[in-house]
């Protein structure tokens, strides 16, 4: 990374960090872009150069999360399924999502209808990029790719919402991580074994469960 790119990255991080500090203190809806700009010692125009909307300031990690989803699909190990690759990626996030600090993030979303609406846009964006990735990787029909991507993103969104619910309830640490991973495993088991038996008890084969738990721990 050259000096110019490094400076731009530093500026973007500083703006996002100052914005999050203000959002955590006063709530998303009570902070203006002008106040974020002043806190980061830049102009409002500079803020909008990096973040098109105020909501993008809060969801500043979305581009990186999007890239990680695509990389998990395209860079998966030989013989690893798309389901397995995405489950492994999300299982690796459980520790961060079950930290005490995540509760601040969860509370800000819970208190802001604007951020909840933006979250829907983010999930739609994830659905598009996942559809493109699996269509290319698996040579799927476009319609099948969109359907599959919709199901995969529904798991991703439910995973994120479950983590927020735990955080808001004050549950964090190892026990919260185990519960979130168990919920994630169950969701992927539903996808892997089909929804025809929805309502029945979902059982993951013992050997498969051990293998998935091992991969998640790694």
Image (cartoon, grey):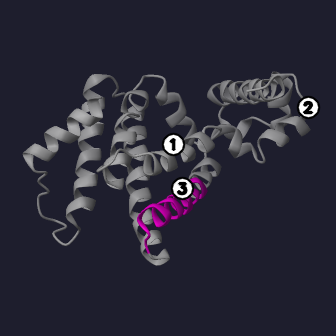
Q: Which residue is mark 3?
A: 126
In x, y percent, where is residue 17? 69, 25
Marker disc for residue 68:
1
Please tell me in which quadrant of the rendered image residue 82 appears.
bottom left
3D distance between C-alphas at marks 2 and 3: 30 Å
Eye-nearest disc, 3 or 1: 1
Marker disc for residue 158:
none
Q: Residue at x 10, y 50 (%)?
A: 205
Count neighbours of disc 2 (C-alpha within 10 A) and say few if under 14, some if 14 to 19, many if 20 or more.
some
Please check the rendered image and state whether residue 175 is part of the magenta-colored stretch, yes or no. no
Are the two marked residues, 2 and 3, in contact with CB atoms closer than 8 angstroms?
Answer: no
Q: Is residue 7 left or right of residue 203?
A: right
On screen, residue 128 above or below 5: below
Q: Pick the residue in front: 109 or 194.
A: 194
On screen, residue 154 above or below 185: below
3D distance between C-alphas at marks 3 and 1: 11 Å
Marker disc for residue 43:
2
Eye-nearest disc, 2 or 1: 1
Image quarter where the C terminus lies is top left
Provide the residue span drawn in magenta. 121-140
Q: Residue at x 41, y 65 (%)?
A: 138
Which mark is first along the chain, 3 or 2? 2
Count neighbours of disc 3 (C-alpha within 10 A) and say few if under 14, some if 14 to 19, many if 20 or more.
many
Magenta segment main secondary structure: helix
Which mark is first along the chain, 1 or 2? 2
Please tell me in which quadrant of the rendered image residue 178 appears.
top left
Q: Pick the residue in front: 160 or 115.
A: 160
In x, y percent, where is residue 42? 88, 27
Q: Is residue 18 left or right of residue 85?
A: right
Image quarter where the N terminus lies is top right
């Amino acid at each position: 990374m050259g000096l110019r790119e490094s400076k731009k990255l530093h500026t973007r991080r500083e703006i996002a960090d100052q914005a999050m500090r203000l959002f955590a203190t006063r709530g998303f809806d009570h902070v203006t872009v002008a106040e974020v700009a002043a806190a980061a010692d830049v102009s409002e125009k500079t803020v909008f150069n990096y973040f098109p909307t105020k909501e993008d300031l809060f969801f500043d990690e979305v581009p990186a999360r999007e890239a990680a989803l695509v990389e998990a699909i395209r860079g998966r190990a030989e013989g690893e399924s798309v389901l397995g690759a995405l489950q492994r990626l999300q299982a690796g996030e459980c520790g961060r999502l079950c930290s005490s600090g995540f509760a601040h993030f969860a509370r800000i979303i819970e208190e802001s209808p604007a951020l909840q609406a933006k979250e829907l846009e983010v999930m739609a964006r994830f659905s598009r990029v996942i559809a493109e990735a699996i269509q290319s990787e698996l040579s799927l029909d476009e319609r099948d790719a969109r359907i599959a991507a919709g199901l995969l993103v529904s798991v991703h969104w439910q995973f994120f919402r479950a983590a927020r619910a735990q955080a808001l309830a004050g549950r964090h640490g190892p026990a919260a991580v185990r519960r979130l991973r168990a919920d994630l495993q169950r969701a992927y088991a539903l996808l892997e074994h089909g929804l025809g038996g929805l309502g029945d008890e979902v059982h993951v084969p013992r050997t498969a469960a051990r293998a998935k738990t091992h991969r998640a721990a790694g």
